[in-house]
Every structure is written in structure tokens, then in C-alpha cells.
């Protein structure tokens, strides 16, 4: 799919276009929490933020990510919580998140509790990333569940995290 250059874009550079869509740190962390933390509601994202995101910043980033086509927001009736879902475009960020995590493992100080998922993704490589993307498509896009033997990637990531606690 091809997109036209947005009038607000600084340039037509593909790297710039990507950075403008999801490149600020809060947007990446919100996507991370929806993708890896299974947090789909505003309050879950706010309460579960390891980095302590403020509610006004979270509201702004969610709105930006929806406008950029990286999240969808469920139409909720009055008094109901709206769920956020990943789009195909954001699901395709899994390899980028895995590579960012692997870079962070090698070059930045991390904690055992928070590094285990990145280690699992790095060790699993593209095969695991593709399996994880298929699972995310089931959860967020309603695709049929992938065939698998053994635990899902989500289950393996959750187990690695709880084992590290």
C-alpha cells in the first residue's frame, strides 16, 4: 500500500515518515504495552506504565496513534470503556521492537525482570516474531488462530516475565 506525503511531514524520507508516525518515546512505549502487555484500555495503560506516563500524555499519544493508523479505538457507548487494538501496520512493528530490545540488551543497562522478553524475542528470531504477529492478528484483528504445538508466544513471554520475578 502506498501513501501520499502528508502536508505536515518534514520530508518524504521513509525514516522520517516512520519517526513521525511512532518515533517519540511515549508512542513506542504505548505500542509496546498494547503489544506485549496486553493492555487495551486507558486505565490499564496508565496504571501499568513502568515509566509512569502522565494521563494527559497518554491521552495525547493514544489519539496520535489512532490518527496515524497504528491503533484503532472501539466505539464505546456512554459510561463504557473503549478498547484500543493494534492495526496491521503496528503488528508489523514486532521485528523492529525485537531489534530495539536486542540493541538495548547489548548496549544499555537493563534489569533482569524487564530484559527477559527481549532475550526471548532475540533468541527466537524471525520465526518467533512471525508466530507472535499471527497471534496478535488473532487478538486484535480477528484473524483465525494460528496452528501451534505447545504454548503461544504470549504465554511464553508471560512465563519468562513471571519466572524473572
Image (spheres, rainbow, N blue to C red):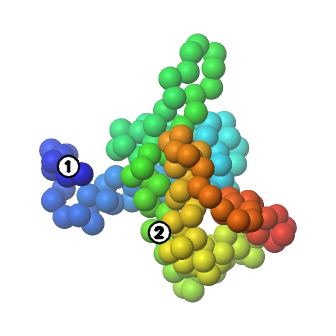
Question: Residue, x 52% and y 45% (percent of image)?
Answer: 143
Q: Which mark is residue 95?
A: 2
Horizontal side, residue 100 vs residue 23: left or right: right
Image location (x, y in percent) of residue 55: 58, 38
Horizontal side, residue 159 vs residue 60: left or right: right
Q: Which residue is mark 1?
A: 3
Image location (x, y in percent) of residue 53: 59, 48
Most extreme residue toward the bottom, as rendered?
106
Question: Residue, x 52% and y 49% (percent of image)?
Answer: 137
Image location (x, y in percent) of residue 35: 57, 54
Q: Which mark is residue 65?
A: none
Question: Residue, x 55% and y 21% (percent of image)?
Answer: 76
Q: Quadrant of residue 81?
A: top right
Q: Quadrant of residue 66?
A: top left
Q: Is residue 34 visible?
A: no
Horizontal side, residue 121 vs residue 157: left or right: left
Amino acid at each position: 500500500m502506498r501513501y501520499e506525503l502528508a502536508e505536515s511531514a518534514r520530508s518524504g524520507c521513509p525514516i522520517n515518515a516512520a519517526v513521525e508516525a511512532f518515533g517519540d518515546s511515549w508512542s513506542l512505549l504505548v505500542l509496546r504495552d498494547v503489544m506485549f502487555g496486553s493492555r487495551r484500555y486507558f486505565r490499564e495503560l496508565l496504571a501499568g506504565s513502568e515509566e509512569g506516563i502522565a494521563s494527559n500524555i497518554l491521552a495525547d499519544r493514544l489519539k496520535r496513534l489512532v490518527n496515524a493508523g497504528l491503533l484503532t479505538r472501539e466505539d464505546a457507548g456512554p459510561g463504557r470503556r473503549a478498547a484500543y487494538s493494534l492495526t496491521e501496520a503496528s503488528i508489523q512493528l514486532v521485528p523492529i521492537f525485537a531489534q530495539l530490545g536486542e540493541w538495548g540488551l547489548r548496549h544499555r543497562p537493563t534489569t533482569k525482570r524487564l530484559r527477559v522478553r527481549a532475550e526471548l524475542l532475540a533468541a527466537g528470531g524471525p520465526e518467533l516474531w512471525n508466530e507472535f504477529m499471527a497471534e496478535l492478528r488473532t487478538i486484535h484483528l480477528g484473524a483465525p488462530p494460528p496452528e501451534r504445538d505447545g504454548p503461544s508466544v504470549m504465554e511464553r513471554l508471560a512465563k519468562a516475565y513471571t519466572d524473572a520475578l
